[in-house]
Image: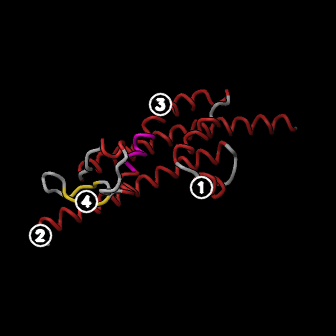
Amino acid sequence: MDKHDEDTSRLYFTVGQGITLWSKMENVLVFMFAILMPVTLPKAGLVLYSINFNQWLHLIDELLADSDFVEARLGWNKLKSELKALSDTRNVLAHHQVDRDVDERPSLVPSAFDSRSKTLKKHPLSVEDIQEFSTKVNLMGLKLDAVSKLIENVVKTRAGKSALGAT
């Protein structure tokens, strides 16, 4: 295998890793949504995977508007804009193609037919860019996990109050 093939294989591997880490991070969002509704995880997945990612964020945002979720909402609000930015990069990983950049290194570039201004403003993604994305997504998953624990605590406290009120 020559250097070109090795670099290209490394790019494909890194893209796969980034998409996989994104998927794992999405699981935390599905879990949060399931707790907030409350519904089973498969039902939460059915709803969320049927709509676009910005709608996921909107629904969770609306569900956290309840006054009991003040602490969780503060944590969530800090993460939303970062999630939107990460989603843009995730879309590049999912929809762009491997080609060579100006330095002749393999990178992810948009289709020649994608003439949207948003796309034209972006630079090709290198292996290093995608690794940075993966690190950010991994950290985001940990931050979301912390917020989901806050949500879970509120829901458990509510359940305890309901049980006490029922006796």
Q: Position of residue 2 (x, y in %)?
A: 11, 70
Residue at left 80%, top 39%? Answer: 163
Mark 3 crowdedness (10 Å alpha carbons): few <14, some 14-19, many ≥20: few
Q: CA distance from mark 2 to mark 1?
A: 43 Å
Find residue 78 and name its label: 3
The amino acid marked with disc number 3 is Lys
The amino acid marked with disc number 4 is Leu
Residue at left 63%, top 58%? Answer: 42
Query: Which residue occupies the extreme right position in the image?
Result: 167
Find residue 74 and name its label: none
Mark 4 sits on what residue?
11
In terms of secondary structure, where does tag 4 sit? helix
Q: Is residue 145 magenta?
A: no
Q: Nearer the viewer, residue 15 or 137?
A: 15
Mark 1 sits on what residue?
50
The amino acid marked with disc number 1 is Ser
Q: Nearer the viewer, mark 3 or mark 2?
A: 2
Q: Are marks 4 and 3 in contact (CB under 8 Å)?
A: no
Q: Quadrant of the C terminus?
A: top right
Vertical placement of residue 108 versus 167, above or below = below
Q: Nearer the viewer, residue 110 or 166?
A: 110
Q: Nearer the viewer, mark 4 or mark 3?
A: 4
Q: Quadrant of the N terminus?
A: bottom left
Q: Which residues are magenta?
A: 84-90
Q: CA distance from mark 1 to mark 3?
A: 25 Å
Reading the chain from its start, which is encountered first: label 3 or label 2? 2
Reading the chain from its start, which is encountered first: label 1 or label 3? 1
Reading the chain from its start, which is encountered first: label 4 or label 3? 4
